[in-house]
């Protein structure tokens, strides 16, 4: 026993990862950590590191085909802020570290979309001036240094002894079961978004919204201390073809942002309700409010409308949000099924159906996982810039998925490769381009 704090590194298996591995080990040694490298990527080694060691660092840099350290990234990581995730490449959308900022934002390093439009990255500080610096891993190592220094100055949280972790039945032991039961919700949201206002807005207003967030000084008086802006493309591009699974995954993350905020602001504009995404955000805020009213949760964000012309805030939603309790239950079930750290389809244990039916119809009358995962869809309102608004109801949100144009993933893949147009089941003809994947094969129109 040396008395030093322990740091376990799961390195990238790529040859290019050797340089970053050496840099991380130098940094750990400099800051007084006893470092070890773990190149056996299994659930067992992941559990051992997360539950027993003082600090764990995962290098999730990938070329899209190698799994590497992902195999040992057990699903307890969002609940543990001593688990640090770094990557030279953008993280998958469903990877949710407790401490954010160790990887470049999607779709780094692109600066333009296929149609020439500029990529708008989240207005956040990536341990620099807000721009990710890839050269010499500058931003990554700067962020990692800050996180390691912070952890070194804090008491070590609950850990399990390491020696028993090599016993065959250790993952099923009462100590491990008890450790898991004591985990709380994802720390990234508890830490970052309480006391803040989530802004729901149309992408065409992003410049004004970002300016509002930068000039906000609510900390000096009443109201939220910070305005949380989800940048266009941070979770989904406006004209990105997405499966129902991906849409619900994005909604599950928006739900966490919204439920963790103290206020929910609608940035008022004529086209606010002409988007399925802004309708979804508004419905999620109402889900939180109704659950608080029923005593299911203890807090919910106050819904307010911001008038950009006058700069005034009005309490209450822009209009009455209609939602039945069974619809609320359905929305909660679907966001629960698709939240980060949950397998698709769910697995309930040996002897059970490995692919149970979905609780709602996905495409037409289909409730199967193939349709949920592989049928891509897009809102024609977005393509046609239609001012036709959605009604403010959960019915409109759920029905909206069926009213979108649907495409077969294989046909989209072939069209992207050939440059030819592709037709939806509803008759819409478009051309597509393929961007780097966030999860699997996804497309942008």
Image (cartoon, rainbow, N blue to C red):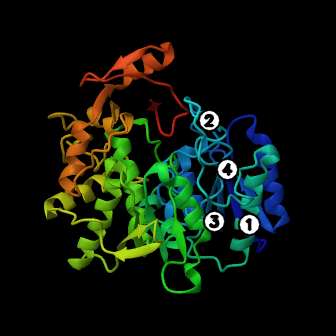
Which residue is painted at 31% across and 47% down in the image? 346
Instruction: Assign a secondary structure to mark 1.
Output: helix
- Counting residues from the N terminus, which is met first, the one under dot 4 or under dot 2? 4
- Circle 2 packing at 10 Å, graded few (<14), some (14-19), many (20+), is few
Residue bearing the label numbered 3: 53
Which residue is painted at 32% across and 66% down in the image? 285
Q: Position of residue 253 (x, y in %)?
A: 42, 56
Q: Position of residue 365 (x, y in %)?
A: 14, 34
- Counting residues from the N terminus, which is met first, the one under dot 1 or under dot 3? 3
Instruction: Assign a secondary structure to mark 3.
Output: loop
The quadrant in which residue 99 appears is bottom right
Residue bearing the label numbered 2: 112
Residue bearing the label numbered 1: 146
- Counting residues from the N terminus, which is met first, the one under dot 2 or under dot 3? 3
Q: Which-is-in-front pick, marks 4 and 1?
A: 1
Instruction: Assign a secondary structure to mark 4.
Output: loop
Q: Is residue 271 visible?
A: yes
Which residue is painted at 32% across and 35% down in the image? 380
The quadrant in which residue 381 appears is top left
Vertical placement of 378 versus 411: above or below? below
- Circle 1 packing at 10 Å, graded few (<14), some (14-19), many (20+), is few
Residue bearing the label numbered 4: 38
Instruction: Assign a secondary structure to mark 2.
Output: loop
Q: Is residue 361 left or right of residue 232?
A: left
Task: Check whether the beta carbons of the residues at disc 4 and disc 2 lie within 8 A of each other.
Answer: no
């Amino acid at each position: 026993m040396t008395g030093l704090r322990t740091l376990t590194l799961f390195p990238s298996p790529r040859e290019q990862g050797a340089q970053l591995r050496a840099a991380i080990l130098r940094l750990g040694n400099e800051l007084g950590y006893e470092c070890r490298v773990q190149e056996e990527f299994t659930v067992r080694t992941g559990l051992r590191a997360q539950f027993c060691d003082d600090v764990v660092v995962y290098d999730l840099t990938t070329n899209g085909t190698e799994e590497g350290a992902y195999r040992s990234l057990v699903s307890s990581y969002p609940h543990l802020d001593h688990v640090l995730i770094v990557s030279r490449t953008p993280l998958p959308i469903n990877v949710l570290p407790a401490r954010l900022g160790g990887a470049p934002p999607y779709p780094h390093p692109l600066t333009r979309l296929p149609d020439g439009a500029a990529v708008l990255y989240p207005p956040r500080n990536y341990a620099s001036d807000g721009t990710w610096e890839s050269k010499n891993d500058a931003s990554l190592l700067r962020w990692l240094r800050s996180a390691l220094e912070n952890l070194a100055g804090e008491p070590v949280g609950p850990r399990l002894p390491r020696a028993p972790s090599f016993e065959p039945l250790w993952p099923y032991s009462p100590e491990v079961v008890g450790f898991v039961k004591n985990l709380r919700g994802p720390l990234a949201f508890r830490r970052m978004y309480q006391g803040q206002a989530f802004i729901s807005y149309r992408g065409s207003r992003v410049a004004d919204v970002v300016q509002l967030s930068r000039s906000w000084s609510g900390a000096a008086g009443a109201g939220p201390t910070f305005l949380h802006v989800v940048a266009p493309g941070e979770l989904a591009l406006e004209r990105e073809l997405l499966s129902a699974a991906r849409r619900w995954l994005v909604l599950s993350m928006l739900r966490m942002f919204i439920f963790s905020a103290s206020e929910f602001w609608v940035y008022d504009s004529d086209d606010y309700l002409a988007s399925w995404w802004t309708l979804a955000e508004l419905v999620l805020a109402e889900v939180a409010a109704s659950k608080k009213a029923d005593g299911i949760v203890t807090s919910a964000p106050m819904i307010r409308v911001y008038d950009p012309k006058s700069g005034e805030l009005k309490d209450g939603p822009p209009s009455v949000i209609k939602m039945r309790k069974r619809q609320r239950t359905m929305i909660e079930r679907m966001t629960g099924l698709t939240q980060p750290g949950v397998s698709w389809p769910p697995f309930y244990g040996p002897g059970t159906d490995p692919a149970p039916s979905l609780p709602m119809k996905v495409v037409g009358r289909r409730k199967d996982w193939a349709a949920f995962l592989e049928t891509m869809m897009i809102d024609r309102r977005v393509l046609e810039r239609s001012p036709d608004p959605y009604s403010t109801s959960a019915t409109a949100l759920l029905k909206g998925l069926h009213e979108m144009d649907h495409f077969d993933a294989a046909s989209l893949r072939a069209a992207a490769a050939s440059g030819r147009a592709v037709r939806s089941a509803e008759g819409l003809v478009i051309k597509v381009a393929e961007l780097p994947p966030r999860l699997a094969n996804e497309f942008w129109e």
